[in-house]
Image (cartoon, rainbow, N blue to C red):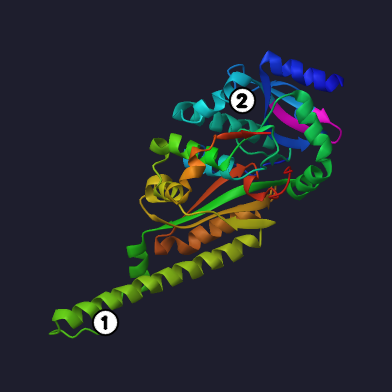
């Protein structure tokens, strides 16, 4: 398949990546997947690298009990 | 029976299968590439199953199964390297094939479990891949300095309706109201602009969606982000890129900057339900 030229930036910001690979893409198919709490944990883990006010708000909105649940879920 | 036994054997060997994405078997990369991957060994395997193929890496269960995974989720350096590897593998696949990107840390406990998933969900996966065939995701962001934009748009009304000699509470209140109206006006104008841009770009896209706006700290740009959107476009059609270039030319005078990113694996255009259940 031909690609468009990459006029596009090469050094993708981590936030740009994280928003896509953690919040989008096909979900819930694996034997192990990240739960919502796990995704929040990743944002917490990356907070210094992301430094996003939007992310912090999102975390404040999230249910605290959910944050205490196991990060990864398996079935 | 044998597959269940094998699954148990693989589990006891401490290997799990990290799934990056699913591709049509007809355009899948050759089996086994030594790409940068989520593991130190760098191995990426392509598991063909009928019309579909899974792009995977056999990975140590100690890292990707519980409790090891939970511990890693709090390690920023580990996370960043794995997130970047996930994206890099998918980008390499995207150069050769349509790809259905899976979410970070989608893991199977055996190769047979991956194959079983491809078999069981074949119809949905094929349908989702059909939507994405020959298409990639492009990101478009627009930035503006709101003060400059307000000035250029002539909507700075702070000085209107206030006489020279007016002062005190009412003047202050009126000025505040005027400022408020000004900010609302600007907000409305910005929304109208974003809608117009979106409509323009959708003429060259199969689908489009708005993403959450990023703060200046997150975007790395001092200006306000007015728009953050993703579009699903034909990989070999320059129409979309030309449309962005046209917007750049049209709005440069207003101090509005457009940023184009991609081509991305189409993370934002996978059906919500694909692969669930």
Quadrant for residue B114, please give it: top right
The answer to whether one can see residue B205 in this image is no
* Picture residue at 42% right of the left edge, 69% below the top: B187
* Picture residue at 73% right of the left edge, 42% below the top: B275
Residue assigned mark 2: B65
The quarter of the image holding the C terminus of chain A is top right
The residue sitting at the front extreme is: A65
Residue assigned mark 1: B160
Q: Is residue A47 magenta?
A: no
Dominant SS of magenta comes to: strand
In the rendered structure, the residue with mark 2 lies on which chain? B
Answer yes or no: are tags 1 and 2 on the same subunit: yes
Residue bounds of the magenta highlight: B48-56
Q: Nearer the viewer, mark 1 or mark 2?
A: 2
User: Dot 1: within a 10 Å radius of its alpha carbon, few (fewer than 14), some, or many (20 or more) residues?
Assistant: few
Residue B253's x, y, as percent? 41, 63
Depth check: B138 or B13 in front? Answer: B13
Residue B188's x, y, as percent? 45, 72
Residue A28's x, y, as percent? 67, 40
Is residue B104 shown above or below B158? above
Left or right, B231 with reference to B126? left
Depth check: B179 or B1 in front? Answer: B1
């Amino acid at each position: 398949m031909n690609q468009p030229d990459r006029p596009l930036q090469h050094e993708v910001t981590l936030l740009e990546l994280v928003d896509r690979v953690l919040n989008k893409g096909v979900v819930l198919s694996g034997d192990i997947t990240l739960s919502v709490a796990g995704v929040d944990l990743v944002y917490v883990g990356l907070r210094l690298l992301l430094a996003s006010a939007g992310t912090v708000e999102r975390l404040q909105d999230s249910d605290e009990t959910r944050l205490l649940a196991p990060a990864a879920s398996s079935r | 029976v044998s597959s269940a036994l094998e699954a148990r054997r693989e589990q006891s060997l401490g290997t799990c299968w990290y799934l990056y994405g699913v591709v049509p078997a007809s355009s899948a990369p050759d089996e086994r590439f030594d790409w940068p991957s989520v593991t130190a060994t760098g191995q990426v395997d392509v598991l063909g199953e009928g019309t579909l193929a899974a792009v995977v890496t056999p990975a140590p269960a100690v890292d990707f199964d519980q409790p090891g995974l939970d511990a890693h989720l709090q390690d920023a350096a580990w996370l960043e390297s794995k997130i970047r590897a996930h994206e890099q593998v998918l980008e390499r696949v995207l150069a050769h094939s349509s790809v259905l990107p899976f979410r970070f840390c989608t893991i199977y406990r055996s190769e047979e479990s991956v194959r079983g998933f491809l078999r069981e969900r074949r119809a949905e996966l094929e349908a989702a891949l059909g939507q994405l065939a020959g298409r990639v995701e492009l990101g478009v962001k627009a930035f503006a300095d709101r003060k400059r934009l307000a000035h250029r748009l002539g909507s700075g009304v702070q000085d209107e309706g206030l006489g020279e000699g007016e002062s005190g509470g009412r003047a202050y209140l009126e000025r505040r109201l005027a400022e408020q109206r000004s900010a609302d006006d600007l907000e409305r104008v910005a929304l109208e602009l974003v809608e117009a841009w979106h409509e323009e770009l959708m003429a060259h896209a199969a689908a489009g969606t708005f993403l959450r706006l990023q703060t200046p700290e997150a975007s790395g740009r001092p200006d306000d982000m007015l728009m953050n959107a993703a579009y699903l476009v034909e990989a070999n059609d320059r129409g979309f890129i030309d449309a962005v270039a046209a917007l750049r030319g049209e709005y440069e005078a207003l101090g509005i900057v457009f940023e184009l990113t991609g081509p991305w694996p189409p993370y934002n255009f996978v059906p919500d339900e694909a692969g669930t259940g």
